[in-house]
């Protein structure tokens, strides 16, 4: 499995963020936050 390094991960409480289509919106860092370990890997056409 590949490891991805997040330069500045959000440390705010996931439950307090506003739900969005692809994750949750953090009103502290103003970004959409996703939990990567719950994402499925896409199959490459190879």
Image: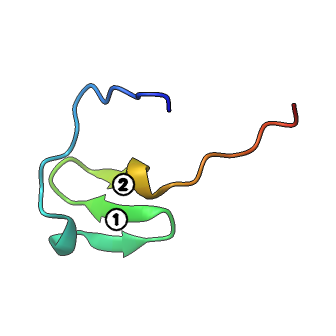
Residue, disc 2:
35
In the image, farthest residue toward the right:
45
Rendered position, 29 above or below 4:
below
Q: Which mark, by number, is residue 38?
A: none
Rendered position, 23 above or below 37:
below
Pick the front one: 19 or 44: 44
Can you give x and y, in whole percent of width and height, for residue 37 in the image?
A: 40, 50
Residue found 20% across the figure and 47% down from its top:
29
Rendered position, 16 above or below 10:
below
Can you give x and y, in whole percent of width and height, for residue 17 in the image?
A: 23, 69
Tag 1 secondary structure: strand
State left or right for residue 13 relative to residue 4.
Answer: left
Can you give x and y, in whole percent of width and height, for residue 42 in the image?
A: 69, 46
State left or right for residue 36 relative to residue 6.
Answer: right
In the image, farthest residue toward the front:
1
Residue found 38% across the figure and 54% down from its top:
34
Rendered position, 2 above or below 19:
above
Number of marks in the image?
2
Residue, disc 1:
24
State left or right for residue 31 relative to residue 13.
Answer: right
The image quadrant where one finds the C terminus is: top right
Dot 2 surroundings within 10 Å: few (below 14), some, or many (20 or more)?
A: few
Pick the front one: 17 or 43: 43
| Sooner in the amino-acid sequence: mark 2 or mark 1 | 1
Gap between marks 2 and 1 measured at Cα: 9 Å
Q: Quadrant of residue 23?
A: bottom left
Tag 2 secondary structure: loop
Dot 1 surroundings within 10 Å: few (below 14), some, or many (20 or more)?
A: some
């Amino acid at each position: 499995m590949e490891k991805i390094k997040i330069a500045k991960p959000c440390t705010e409480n996931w439950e307090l963020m506003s739900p969005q289509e692809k994750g949750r919106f953090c009103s502290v860092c103003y970004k959409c936050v996703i939990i990567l370990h719950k994402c499925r890997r896409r199959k490459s056409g190879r």
